[in-house]
Amino acid sequence: MSEQKNINWTNARTLVALAILVGTELVGASWAAGWALGGLFQLGPAYARGFEILFIVIGFIGLYYFMRTAIAHEPIRR
């Protein structure tokens, strides 16, 4: 029978704050990049929204890999 590890709340709070801060920056910048490229190439509204959605998805993927690395370096369980 495996033993349940306790949660290190200091690390958990740090990781939640990090996810909020970096997530806002990364996803917001990705969204803005999609909007800017749609306007730069003078695409129609549907294509501009497509660029925004594509870049938002790329931002969330980047956030996923960033948080995966952060959790590996700052584990939640003791």
Image (cartoon, grey):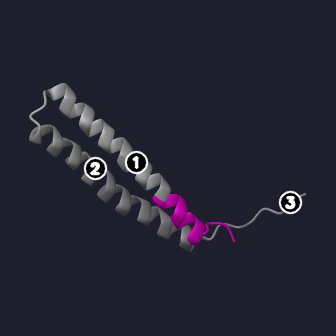
* Residue where numbered disc 3 is placed: 2
Q: CA distance from mark 3 to mark 2?
A: 42 Å
* Residue 41 percent across, percent down from the top left: 11, 37
Identify the amino acid type marked 3.
Ser
Element type at mark 2: helix
Q: Magenta: predominant secondary structure element?
A: helix
- Whichever of callouts 1 and 3 sits on the residue coming sooner in the sequence is 3
Q: Nearer the viewer, residue 6 or 56?
A: 56
Question: In the image, 78: left or right of 35?
Answer: right
Residue 72, picture quadrant: bottom right
Q: Which mark is residue 10?
A: none
Q: Is residue 68 magenta?
A: yes
* Residue at 67%, 67% in the rendered image: 77
* Residue 56 percent across, percent down from the top left: 32, 43
Identify the amino acid type marked 2.
Ser
Q: Quadrant of the C terminus?
A: bottom right
Residue 26, picture quadrant: bottom left
* Residue where numbered disc 1 is placed: 60
Q: CA distance from mark 2 to mark 1?
A: 9 Å
Which range is magenta? 66-78
Q: CA distance from mark 1 to mark 3?
A: 34 Å
Instruction: Report the number of numbered marks.
Output: 3
Neighbor class of circle 3 (other Cα within 10 Å; few <14, some 14-19, many 20+) is: few
Residue 35, picture quadrant: top left
Question: In the image, 27: left or right of 4?
Answer: left
* Residue where numbered disc 2 is placed: 30
Element type at mark 1: helix
Neighbor class of circle 1 (other Cα within 10 Å; few <14, some 14-19, many 20+) is: some
Question: In the image, 57: left or right of 3?
Answer: left
